[in-house]
Structures are given as C-alpha cells and as structure tokens.
Amino acid sequence: MSVERILYPCYFDVTLQRREGRRVPKNLGVKSPELPAIEAVLRRMKVPHRLEEHHHPARWAEREGRIVAEWEGSKEDLIRKVAKSLGGRK
C-alpha cells in the first residue's frame, strides 16, 4: 500500500523564501514551476499521481493546484528527485 505525498509548485520555486513555502535549496529550484512540468516529471519517474484543485495553505490567494503522488519513501526524497528532474542545478 502506497503513501500519498502532496506536492505544491511553490516547493520548487527559487523566487520564494523558505518561509514562503520553498522546500528545496535554491540550487535545485526553478523559476515559476508549473503543475504540468511537475506532472511530466512524475510520469517519467512512473510515480502514480493525480491532480487536485487545492492550494497551499500559506498561499491561499494563489490557485496553483497540487499533485497527490503515491510514494513509499520520504516526502523530502520525492521532492529532491522531482527538483533535480525539473532542471535545478546539482
């Protein structure tokens, strides 16, 4: 049975501060990440997922959506793997 991990685009946004929702180091972030790009990475990784119309609680005015991925490992591991595939520097 897989564990659901929620991913928001703001986790990968290099223009945001950590307190604003960024969860990756600046060298792994990308400018203005979009949900379709994150979804494409998960599809290439063959991670089952679904899109939802929800927003990040701290960024309620931004209607950017979220992805719910089925991932057995830690959420931080998934976030880093996605960030590296999005085009962030290593």
Image (cartoon, rainbow, N blue to C red):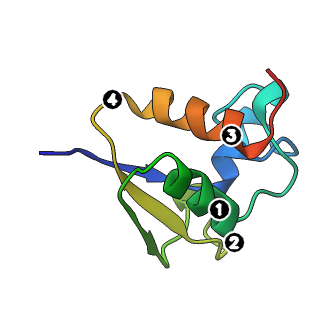
Tag 2–tag 3 contact (CB < 8 Å):
no
Give the residue at mark 3: 85
Mark 1–mark 2 Cα distance, whole angstroms, equals: 6 Å
Residue assigned mark 4: 73
Q: Please name which of the two marks, 1 or 4, marks the residue nearer to the observer.
A: 4
Q: Residue at position x 11%, y 45% from top?
A: 1
- Of labels 4 and 2, earlier in sequence is 2
Tell me the kind of residue under disc 3.
Answer: Ser
Q: Quadrant of residue 73?
A: top left
Dot in front, 2 or 3: 3
Helix, strand or loop for disc 1: helix
Q: Residues within 10 Å of mark 4 (few under 14, many from 20)?
A: few
Check disc 1 and give the amino acid type. Arg
Q: Do the numbered discs 4 and 2 sit on residues whose CB atoms are within 8 Å?
A: no
Q: CA distance from mark 3 to mark 1?
A: 24 Å
Residue, disc 1: 59
For disc 3, the neighbor class at 10 Å (few under 14, some 14 to 19, many from 20) is some
Q: Which mark is residue 74?
A: none
Horizontal relation, residue 90 to residue 31: left or right: left
Mark 2: amino acid? Glu
